[in-house]
Image: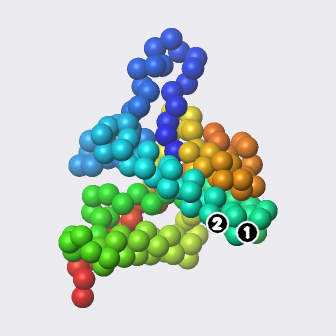
Amino acid sequence: MVPVSPVGPADSWKTLGQARQGETVDGRSRPWSAGAGSGSLATGLVQLAWLLERVGSGMPGLRCTTKPEPWLAGEAELFVWEAFVSGTGKPVPAGITQHAADAAAAAAADTFADRLEDGSLSVSDVVCTPASSFNLAAAAAAYAGLAIASNELRDQVQVYRTRPALEPS
């Protein structure tokens, strides 16, 4: 998701592209639209659309959501959320290997499993406030032909910051 400034105030355009609340590194926030953010956004968006279309082609009628409540209630089979792998949550560098990729995926999966167990899936670490949000995950799901509520296009996506990485044993 990316923040969209409110239309009302005449100078609201000044906040377009600013960081989402919770994306701080050492107390400073970089805009989501800065170099690395916009580059990974573009790549990740087409990857997500492709992946969701691929999954949906094998499961016609798949119901998708970006909200934990419908998924937990069994109203959707697929829950899409964002892993925020940054700062201390990054895996310990292990070179450019499959093991490094596995470590990054494991950190996100472990974070999700912990939140599921402790009942905190509804608590997002990153939010778009005071701006509204443009839910790109919901847009990708709609593009892929998955059943997703149209109002989710303006809803927040749950963002879970990965916990600090541990040294490999």
Disc 1 secondary structure class: loop
Q: Is residue 168 above or below residue 105?
A: below
Image spot of residue 149 (x, y percent) = 74, 49
Disc 2 secondary structure class: helix
**Residue 70 can be seen, yes or no:** no
Image spot of residue 79 (x, y percent) = 63, 63
Q: Is residue 163 above or below residue 84?
A: below
Identify the residue at horizontal 30%, vertical 78% (top origin). 99
Image spot of residue 30 (x, y percent) = 30, 39
Check disc 1 and report the residue beneath it.
59
Identify the residue at horizontal 58%, vertical 17% (top origin). 8
Image spot of residue 59 (x, y percent) = 73, 69
Identify the residue at horizontal 41%, vertical 57% (top origin). 84
What is the three-letter code of the residue carrying label 1?
Met
What is the three-letter code of the residue carrying label 2?
Val
Q: Nearer the viewer, residue 154 or 147?
A: 147
Taking the image as shown, residue 21 lies to the left or right of residue 131, namely left
Q: Among all residues in the image, which is located at the extreme top?
A: 10
Identify the residue at horizontal 61%, vertical 60% (top origin). 52
Q: Nearer the viewer, residue 85 or 128?
A: 85
Q: CA distance from mark 1 to mark 2?
A: 6 Å
Q: Nearer the viewer, residue 57 or 149?
A: 57
Q: Are marks 1 and 2 in contact (CB under 8 Å)?
A: yes
The C terminus lies in which quarter of the figure? bottom left
Taking the image as shown, residue 124 lies to the left or right of residue 91, namely right
**Residue 16 can be seen, yes or no:** yes
Check disc 2 and report the residue beneath it.
55
Packing grade of label 2 (10 A; few <14, some 14-19, many >=20) is: some
Q: Which mark is residue 38?
A: none
Q: Is residue 94 above or below residue 49?
A: below
